């Protein structure tokens, strides 16, 4: 997570990094862009779940 930087979304112990494939390159998306591309087939999400003790508990 430290190398990825700021997550696209943070939801209660879950950090989502969302990327859209544009012209063959992945570009991280934030804010209103997330809602605009919802349901698109060219959007990818990397999700990290963090336990309440601060340990990583899942990667999806």
Image (cartoon, rainbow, N blue to C red):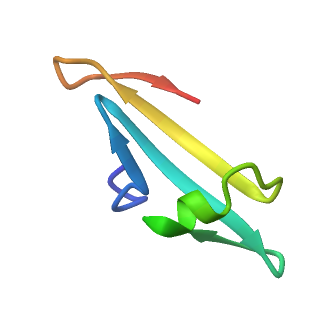
- Where residue 32 sits: x, y (%)? 48, 67
Left or right: where 49 falls relative to 25: left
Q: Quadrant of the C terminus?
A: top right
Report how many numbered discs are placed on residues in the image: 0
Q: Does the image show residue 30? A: no
Please state which of residues 60 and 38 is positioned toward the viewer in this rendering. 38
- Where residue 26 sits: x, y (%)? 68, 69
- Where residue 29 sits: x, y (%)? 53, 67
Please state which of residues 43 and 58 is positioned toward the viewer in this rendering. 43
Whether 53 is drawn above or below 60: the answer is: above
Please tell me in which quadrant of the rendered image residue 37 appears. Answer: bottom right
Please state which of residues 36 and 45 is positioned toward the viewer in this rendering. 36
Q: Residue furthest bottom?
A: 23
- Where residue 25 sits: x, y (%)? 74, 75
Rendered residue at 61%/46% (across/down): 45
Please state which of residues 6 and 36 is positioned toward the viewer in this rendering. 36
Rendered residue at 26%/23% (across/down): 55
Please tell me in which quadrant of the rendered image residue 3 appears. Answer: bottom left
Whether 28 is drawn above or below 1: the answer is: below
Whether 39 is drawn above or below 53: the answer is: below
Rendered residue at 20%/25% (across/down): 54
Q: Does the image show residue 16? A: yes
Rendered residue at 35%/62% (across/down): 5
Whether 21 is drawn above or below 12: the answer is: below
Please tell me in which quadrant of the rendered image residue 10 appears. Answer: top left
Left or right: where 23 falls relative to 53: right
């Amino acid at each position: 997570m430290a190398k990825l930087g700021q997550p696209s979304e943070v939801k209660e112990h879950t950090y989502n990094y969302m990327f859209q494939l544009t012209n063959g390159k992945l570009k991280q998306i934030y804010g209103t862009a997330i809602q605009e591309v919802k349901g698109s087939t060219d959007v990818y999400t990397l999700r990290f779940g963090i336990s309440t003790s601060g340990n990583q508990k899942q990667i999806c």
